[in-house]
Each structure stands twice: as structure tokens, then as C-alpha cells.
Amino acid sequence: MEEKDKIKEIEKRLSKRKNKFPPIDIEIDGLPPYREVDIVIDELVPCLTCRDSGKELDTEFEELEDFSTLKGLKNFGFEWDKVDSDEFKIRALRVKGQKEIQGLVAYRIDKGGVYVELVESNQKNVKKEKGSYAGVGGHLFAEAVRISFENDNEDGLVYFRSKTSLVKYYEKNLGAELTVPKRNMMEISFESAHKLWEKYYAKSDKN
């Protein structure tokens, strides 16, 4: 697909958005506001790493049915309970067997890929506090890639809007490609998507 065709396809997807949460972005060329991703990608490991011990711990995801349970969620900056449940789904990342949420991703399954609206790590991990974990950011994007593959998208397409200052960062750490420079729209697909899936899920999916 040529670059101009990629741009048209992404713009077509974005033009269908009806949700304006969170209200931080201005309208660009008639497109509705959408969220900038700014999560840290500190490690790419098929689990989470405890910063205190260096031990790698197994993880699990939960698809949340009731977003109201996220109201007042401790150690998260966004109001996750206000995400539009008619448009987006939310998955929570935990260390296996623990109740505390380490990361959240809000996404929508589109024809041809997965759009990531919002992604956040527990602030304890961001601040590298005692008992915190590394690897959350990469794990959340890898889960989005897995969702894309599971919905019959052979290239595992995941797309999102990056902060301007983080475009190069996501190119380096996620293998993301800047597809619409004017809007900082990026996508993970093909080789980069397969690498993320292989890193996080190849072993477990074979068991």
C-alpha cells in the first residue's frame, strides 16, 4: 500500500470517531480530537520485571466489563471510568495472582487493525518506586498486537497518535512507523508487529 493510500485509510477510520475523551486535543482539519500516547517503553520482556529483585514475573490480562469499577483508581492519572464503553474496550494488566492493576489500555477493533486510544502504566512504575515493575508499556502494546492478530489482521496492525517529542522514541523502541506526519499518527504492523508477538506470546501460545 502506498503512503497516500495509508493516509486515506487512517483518516477514514479516524473520521468515524464519536468519542472526545479526554478533551485535550484541538480539532485538526475537521477530524475529531484524539489522545496522544506518551507511555514509557522501558523494557521488552515477555512478563514484568520487579525492579527490587530483578525477578521476571508472569502476567495476565483481564477484559473489563464495567468501567465504573475504575472510578478513583489509585496511582493512575486518567479518569478511566469515563472512557466510552460503546466505542472502546479496556484491558487491565496484572502480575499473575495479584489484584493491583499495573497497566491499562483502551482500544477499538477496526476493520483492518486495532486503534489504541489510551494507554497508561501504574504511576508507581513510572516513578520507579519500591515494589514497582518494568516492562508495562511494551506489554500493553504487545497485547494490542495480539488482539489485532486474533481478529484476522494478518499484519497485526495497531495504530495510535504519538506526542511529537516521542515519535523517534516509538520508532526505536516499538518499531512503529510514522504514517501521517502532520498528525503524528503511527502504526505497528508487519515485521514489527510479529516481533512484538514473538517476544511476548509465541512461547505461551504454543503450550
Image (cartoon, helix red, strand yellow):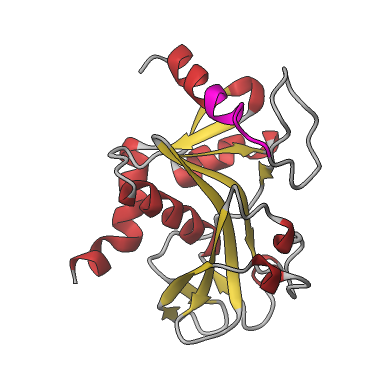
Q: Taking 204 as reference, is 115 above or below it?
A: above
Indicate the position of residue 205 as horizontal and vertical percent values. Answer: 24, 65
Indicate the position of residue 67 as horizontal and vertical percent values. Answer: 65, 66
Q: Residue at x 38, y 37 (%)?
A: 189
Q: Taking 182 as reference, is 102 above or below it?
A: below
Return the residue found at the far left.
206
- Depth check: give the residue in front, 91 or 207: 91
Q: Based on the displayed image, in which of its 4 quarters is residue 198 positioned?
A: bottom left
Please state if 48 lies on the left or on the right of 104 as rendered.
Answer: left
Q: Based on the displayed image, in which of its 4 quarters is residue 146 positioned?
A: bottom left
Residue range highlighted in magenta: 11-18
Please state if 38 lies on the left or on the right of 27 as rendered.
Answer: left
Q: Taking 148 as reference, is 10 above or below it?
A: above
Q: Residue at x 57, y 83 (%)?
A: 52
Q: Quadrant of the N terminus?
A: top left
Q: Is residue 16 magenta?
A: yes
Please state if 30 lies on the left or on the right of 2 as rendered.
Answer: right
Q: Is residue 81 magenta?
A: no
- Depth check: give the residue in front, 207 or 200: 207
- Number of numbered discs visible in the structure rendering: 0
Indicate the position of residue 126 as horizontal and vertical percent values. Answer: 67, 65
Indicate the position of residue 79 as horizontal and vertical percent values. Answer: 76, 61
Q: Residue at x 73, y 67 (%)?
A: 76
Q: Quadrant of the C terminus?
A: bottom left
Q: Taking 97 as reference, is 135 above or below it?
A: above
Q: Based on the displayed image, in which of its 4 quarters is residue 58 positioned?
A: bottom left
